[in-house]
Image: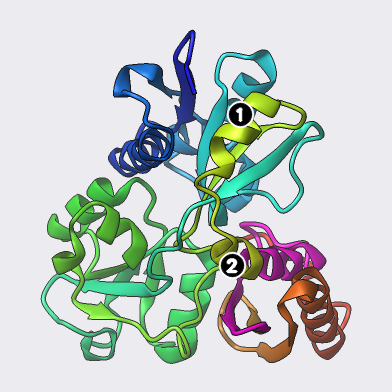
Amino acid sequence: MTQTKPIRIGTRGSKLALVQAAEVRARLMAAHGLPESDFAIEVISTSGDRIQDRPLSEVGGKGLFSKEIEEALFDGRIDLAVHCVKDLATVLPEGLHLSAFLPREDVRDVFIGRSVGRLADLPQGARVGTASLRRQALVRRLRPDLDLVILRGNVQTRLAKLEAGEVEGTLLALAGLNRLSMAETASEVLSAETFLPAPGQGALAIESRIGDSRIDALVAAIDTPAARVPLAAERAFLRRLDGSCRTPIAGLAEIDGDRLSLHGMILRPDGSEVHEGRESGPSAEADAIGERLGERLLAQAGPDFFAGWTG
């Protein structure tokens, strides 16, 4: 494949986002035998990166990490975009699609303590910082005595705040630390069974324009069906629950042969009430499995479970 002009890859500007964009570039170079000069990584500032003083639930939710990047796709300023799947809204703007998924990284969360190694070892009333309502709710379920505070920013910013003593502990995705070659930073890797990850955690997707055959052909070579199918179930589950940054929702789908199993959970923000379930079936029915589990948990929780949540 010969390129007449660089393929422009859109990304957020954090160190992790740039590493992820570089991984996509490297995979495309290897798949097509292209030189690095055939690609240009375009950094796009997003609202989610600029707003650091409020929870995302107060200012628009997940779309804040993709809105400006998607506008650049529509405008033709970039050819494809690299996203963390867990940061994407479940319904994409008309005209865009997720055209490829990379192999999924570790899905688990980690605890990072300033002076203790495990979440269970924190003293009563210790301050724990996280921007995720899911992580807050799961921590409150395990340790209702802790003081949970909002901690925004990229990985390096959060770790600096921890080091400065603003909090005694924080939680991050192991996938991000692995991609940054910082896995040793983790004090404790939390079990995905008891500390269920966010739908899409650990996964990267490429977003592009529907009908752009050149880009579709380019990224098809690095698409990973083994990642795409479980993510379809997780995103269908989230979509049925109208999931956003305002709703503590956890979910993880796994494939065994041609069977898919999905473990999902919805929580009240204070961790006081949880509804949990599992659904399984043929991998070909990934979307339907996610829809069914979402429907079942909604029925269990009742119509008022999500009412009035503000984050």
Q: Quadrant of residue 211 in the image?
A: top right
The amino acid on which the numbered mark 1 sits, given as a three-letter code, is Ile
Question: Which quadrant is home to the C terminus?
Answer: bottom right
Q: Is residue 74 magenta?
A: no
Q: Which residues are magenta?
A: 231-260
Q: Residue, x 43% and y 71% (percent of image)?
A: 107
Q: Residue 311, relative to residue 117: is it above or below?
A: above
Q: Position of residue 31 (x, y in %)?
A: 42, 40
Q: Position of residue 83 (x, y in %)?
A: 51, 43
215 displayed left or right of 43: right
Q: Residue 255, relative to residue 4: is it above or below?
A: below
The answer, for residue 161, to whether it is visible in the render is yes
Q: Position of residue 22 (x, y in %)?
A: 33, 36
Q: Residue, x 64% and y 34% (percent of image)?
A: 216
The amino acid on which the numbered mark 2 sits, given as a three-letter code, is Pro
User: For the residue labelled by badge 2, is the local secondary structure a helix, a strand or a loop?
Assistant: loop
Identify the residue position indicated by label 1 in the image: 215
Disc 1/disc 2 C-alpha distance (Å): 26 Å
Identify the residue position indicated by label 2 in the image: 199
The answer, for residue 65, to whether it is visible in the render is no
Number of other residues with Cα within 10 Å of mark 2, as a class: few under 14, some 14 to 19, many 20 or more: many
